[in-house]
Image (cartoon, rainbow, N blue to C red):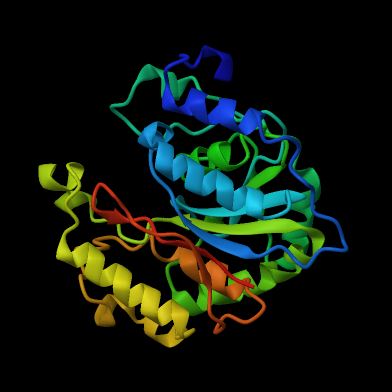
Amino acid sequence: MDALIPAAHPFRRHLDRVATLGAHRPWTPADAPMPSLYLSHGAPPTFEDDVWMRQLHDWARDLPRPTAVLIVSAHWESAPLAISSSAAHTDLVYDFGGFSPLYYRMRYDTPDAGDLARQVTALMPQTVHEHTGRGLDHGAWVPLKIMYPEADVPVLQLSIPTHDAATLLGLGERLRPLREQGVLVIGSGFMTHGLPFLTRAMLAGHVPGWSSDFDQWAAEALARGDVDELAAFRDKAPGMPYAHPTVEHFTPLFVTLGAAADPTGPVRTAIDGYAMGFAKRSFQTA
């Protein structure tokens, strides 16, 4: 379906640029474990943002190409714990509205992720149901299609079963061994996500104080590895509840931290800045 993208479209320019870069070096056992990532994802307009696409793809190229990706998205809240279809070429979830028909025809036909599905289920103390008809939602496929446009990495999505920070840290810890197999563990959300408070001024580039204040608070807590402070975001973070009137775009961060070698270690910021007034802060752990 990428062949249908118009030549003048920003994503076409992105694909043309990627094509000049040559092969992406794959992860090998001689490498260190893959990091775990927290990334801020956008909706389909991300495919029209040259800067954001370059940031995401450059970040991916700074790392070895993973053996597989396991991603927890804000857009699949489901308990008990579940995984998406592990089959190759599963249909995507187009969980958005009001955009160009182009984005409802996009595909992301990644390879079979059956091996990863078996690894994930073996790590869990409870039965994990595979939804064989469910593909990746936009919190997964939009950023990954930009980061790994060749679609040559198996991808599996894991539901977010709760918004309790301690439980999600424990879930991330169970996933930690996957990193030693070259698997990239990702929590996908948005560092601020006050959609009900979006204004025309924000669309024009204005960053409201509730967004910048929350982002700065999070950056400082992450820099000093203060997991307790981050877990108390509902009460302690400035800008609440405007920055997160619902919390599902922040809480994937705790899966990312749980999967880190040391959840209290400092993180490396890969992307910062704002889109539509929302903080794009994205980071990786050691």
In the rendered view, tell whether residue 153 sits above or below residue 197.
above
Q: Is residue 16 left or right of residue 41?
A: right
Q: Quadrant of residue 248?
A: bottom left
Image x and y of residue 252, in percent: 48, 63
Left or right of 286? Residue 234 is left
Q: Position of residue 286 (x, y in %)?
A: 64, 73
- Residue closest to the eye, 165 or 105: 105
Q: Residue furthest front?
A: 20
Given the current orientation, which residue lies at the most extreme right position?
A: 30
Please state if 156 lies on the left or on the right of 112 as rendered.
Answer: left
**Residue at the spot x=61%, y=70% of the render?**
172
Q: How many marks?
A: 0
In the rendered image, residue 202, in percent from the top left (x then y), is placed at 17, 48
Please tell me which residue is depicted at 23% across the width and 52% down the height of the picture: 277
Which residue is located at x 63 percent, y 39 percent? Answer: 148
The residue closer to the viewer here, 138 or 114, is: 138
The N terminus lies in which quarter of the figure? Answer: top right
Image-quadrant location for residue 264: bottom right
From the viewer's perspective, tell me whether residue 42 is left or right of residue 259: left
Between 82 and 144, the residue placed more toward the observer is 144
- Residue 83 visible in the displayed image: no
Image coords of residue 161 (percent x, y): 50, 62
Residue 166 visible here? yes
Check the image and report above or below for 135 versus 177.
above
User: With respect to residue 11, does 206 lie above or below?
Assistant: below
> Which residue is found at the position 31% from the left and 30% from the top?
97
